[in-house]
Image (cartoon, rainbow, N blue to C red):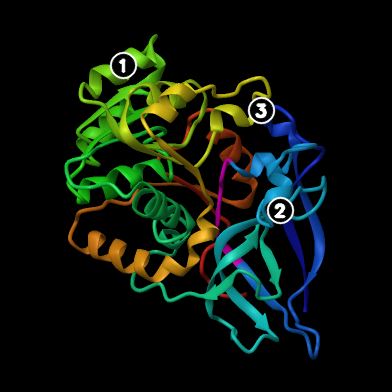
Amino acid sequence: MEVTNKFIAIKATIDGEPQEGDFELKIQPFSLSVKPGSNDVIIKNLYVSIDPYQINRMKTVSSSQKASKFSTRIAPGEVIDAYGVGKVVASGNPKFEKDDYVVGLLSWGEYSISHGFMLSKLDPMGFPLSYHVGLLGLSGLTAYTGLFEICKPKKGEKVFVSAASGSVGNLVGQYAKTLGCYVVGCAGSPDKVKLLKEKLGFDQAFNYKEETDLNATLERYFPDGIDVYFDNVGGEMLEAAISNMNLYGRVALCGVISEYTDVGKRATPNMMDVIYKRIMIRGYLAGDYMHLFPEFISTTIDHLSTGKMLVLEDISIGLESVPSAFIGLFRGYNVGKKIVQVSDDLGDK
């Protein structure tokens, strides 16, 4: 059976802040049947992840394009692969059967075809499917491993999280609170600051857009210094955090969204501080820690069931909303994990 598949593509490479006109909705014939002897899996996409790192794949040149198989360059007009949850329509792969839920590498489209690479059968475990795109997916794993495996905080230590209302930052703060840490987050609006303190349990939070001296701001919130900094933004925030860190401070570098669309902006932390305070700074990718996925899932479900963690999702409806959802990440529009619901789980009808 053949249908038409709609998908989102870029018209040309994007080397600045993305705009609506950079994207297009394309339509092409798509077969819902698997060729005899094929190992292919045909998937109806239900939820897809919207992540800022994708902008680096859309650039003419980015160092990230050669550093990881998950960050390869996206050519204009081609299907854009992305993390998501879907339902199997047809399968020639013995690991998957029709109507199985799957999670992994899908696409910004109505349907995906997979050869089984980075694709797993999904047991929803009674949770909404969208949870497995964010909290119980790669965003959650990124937060969990960055905090616990790289920074290794101890009870009572002081933790600072930038972009703390975002998909990863809000989880880092919540994980740190379960351990008994003092947690401060920054965000870009009064409403987000209120959410961090009143809903997610951060000890303190501030609106970085209202601060004229980030170094002084962090000194105010951390009079005894920072032990752990979880960095999602880079730039001046990283510089200020380094200046306020304690001896043997640890920094997990998750993202540098402040630099993604500004080629002239680069963080310049005081390396004398790094050396003499013996600060550990580590960049990482969630894919480096897939072996910890079962541990991460078990711990996170426990926190959910006991009410120690809350889910923060920002879901847009319809494939056509992908460009605006993506652009909104760079303008601070999202609160929590940004997801697009491509279709309802109504089976293949």
As drawn, is 339 to the left or to the right of 320?
A: left
Q: What mark, if any, has residue 80 been given in the picture?
A: 2
What is the number of the mark on residue 17?
A: 3
Residue 49 included in the magenta stretch of the image:
yes
Q: Residue at x 53, y 71 (%)?
A: 346
Q: As rendered, which of 63 and 112 lies closer to the eye?
A: 63
Q: Which corner quadrant holds the C terminus?
A: bottom right
Closest to the observer: 38 or 256? 256
The circle drawn on residue 43 is none
Q: How far from the left and from the top, in percent, is residue 167?
A: 43, 45
Overall secondary structure of the magenta stretch? strand
Residue 188 can be seen in this image: no
- Give the numbered dot on residue 217: 1
- Cα separation between marks 1 and 2: 40 Å
Q: Residue at x 61, y 75 (%)?
A: 348
Residue drawn at (72%, 79%) of the image: 40
Q: Of residues 62 and 133, which is closer to you in this image? A: 62
SS class, disc 3: loop
Secondary structure type for disc 2: loop
Range covered by the magenta-colored residues? 45-52
Name the amino acid, label 2.
Ile
* Of callouts 3 and 2, the N-terminal one: 3
* Above or below 154: residue 43: below
Q: Is 281 on the left or on the right of 177, as rendered?
A: right
Task: Please state if 45 lies on the left or on the right of 223 as rendered.
Answer: right
Percent coordinates x, y for residue 38 in the rendering: 77, 85
